[in-house]
Image (spheres, grey):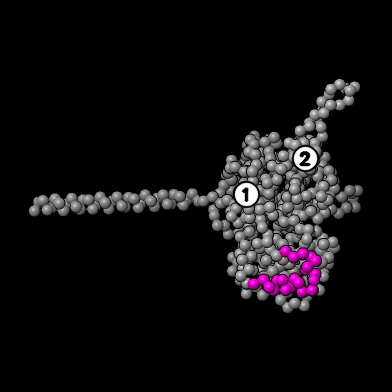
Amino acid sequence: MGERNASSFGFISRNFLFFLLAITSILFSLSWFFVLRSTGSPHFVDHSLLSNSAPPSVIDNGSSKESKPKSLDHVKNSVQEEELPQKKKDIKCNKNKKGVLKVYMYDLPPQFHFELLDWKSQGGSVWPDIRTRIPHYPGGLNLQHSIEYWLTLDLLASEIPDNPSACGAIRVHNSSGADIIFVPFFSSLSYNKYSKKSPQKNKINNKVLQEKVVRFVTSQEEWKRSGGRDHLIVAHHPNSMLDARTKLWPAMFILADFGRYPPHIANVDKDVIAPYKHMVKSYVNDTSEFDSRPILLYFQGAIYRKDGGSVRHELFYLLKDEKDVHFSFGSVQKNGIHQASQGMHSSKFCLNIAGDTPSSNRLFDAIASHCVPVIISDEIELPYEDILDYSEFCIFVRTSDAVKGNFLINLVRNIKKDEWTHMRDRLKEVQRFFEFQFPSKEGDAVQMIWQAVARKVPAMRRNIHKSRRFSRTVTGKEEGLKLIPSQPNFW
């Protein structure tokens, strides 16, 4: 009897120990699960969304750092922007990660940047304290060319510890360790505000500011060292920098297109095409389908244009009697943006026709609306086209074909539901590449522009190095064998 009890007790003890071991293992596994979950996951640009994409290769140079302000986490953006759903959690800026573009930004006086937004410097400070207040950029059509504003804010934010924005680029304070030299002149805003001559002044203020920028930049050692080829200047409005560009042309420009630039001043080899900031609201939580969008083809804007845009009025007469086509005059006045937003959200295809220049904001409004763009602009250049295949979500039509009888309407009608759905789904995937926001996020327009600049750096650096091959030459006999630096060869 005692043996049986002892045996039973041993059996129970073994079962109890096994039970404790199982419970301990389960609790240990759960603890690791919650720890890992709490750390979040990195949110990088999804290069699988891009065609033949590759991360930029930029030489990693050191830089000296000054003392930086505190956190940006509590800042509320004064420029309100609808946030798109993010699949992954955003991460803090990792300034040491490979491929971060190092940018030296000139401390231009405020009259060239934030004073244009009616910001007043306190205590002689060049830059606003973006931890407490972000100067508001004016709305309406001004916003479509606001690229330099977003890039400048992103560089200022990169100096703040625990910066919540992404960091495709960081500001450095040693120009010899920089990949690029940034000129923070709000040229588009200068044109919009100061392009008209004042009766009290002999010169147009916009031209005066351009002259001052040229004098400042060309006098800097950084400009003389490279002949300006490692400088980055934003001139997104097609009429901005028209005077200064003839003197600053060796620099890399960020432009909307090349419509008003001769090839020796701006070209696709040295310059970067950036998207417009779209005017219509992003189509968040879009559940529309092919059959729920009643308008086949949509266009609203200025119908009578010059140059490449003259095709607009020809297309108007070809399409005006089609019942499921909306083709009418429109502007930003009288609730025009809201009407355009509703119209694009209700349309399968949206026309993007050249205007006075090859590009227009309408393309990016269409992308934000998931309305498949139909592009009729033979000379258009597109943002990030070295890594992004627009034929996956856009339809391109030659101008000469578009004005032929029923060519355009038949082409669009023959696109079936499955093909349209595939392009619409692709639009949803690439939409984030065209969103401007602060703080910036991985894969948004700000970060994509920095990556586009970074991809230009190796070729830019190669040209600078080649220009130094014959950096010294022999002068006249009367001075003996005197060696002097040669002038750099530009692009």
Who's the residue at 64% across and 36% down the image?
A: 61
Within 10 angstroms of label 2, few (less than 14), some, or many (20 or more) residues? many
Chain-order first, disc 1 or disc 2: 1
Report the side of 349 relative to 24 (left or right): right
Report the side of 134 relative to 41 (left or right): right
Amino acid at circle 2: Gly
Percent from the top left, x then y, of residue 407? 76, 72
Which residue sits furthest left?
1
Q: Do residues under tags 1 and 2 come within 8 Å of each other at their CB atoms?
A: no
**Disc 2: which residue:** 228
Task: State the CA–CA distance, disc 1 to disc 2.
Answer: 27 Å
- Look at the image and give the residue range highlighted in magenta: 396-416
Q: Does 406 sit above or below residue 120? A: below
Q: Is residue 413 magenta?
A: yes
Residue 126 visible to an observer of this rendering: no
Percent from the top left, x then y, of residue 152? 70, 47
Percent from the top left, x then y, of residue 481? 84, 22
Q: Is residue 373 magenta?
A: no
> In terms of secondary structure, where does tag 2 sit?
loop
Residue 381 visible to an observer of this rendering: yes
Amino acid at circle 1: Ala
For residue 358, what is the image quadrant? Answer: bottom right
Who's the residue at 34% across and 50% down the image?
A: 25
Report the side of 131 relative to 410 (left or right): left
**In this rendering, the label closer to the viewer, 1 or 2:** 1
**Disc 1: which residue:** 54
Percent from the top left, x then y, of residue 266? 79, 49
Work out which quarter of the rendered image holds the C terminus and state it: top right
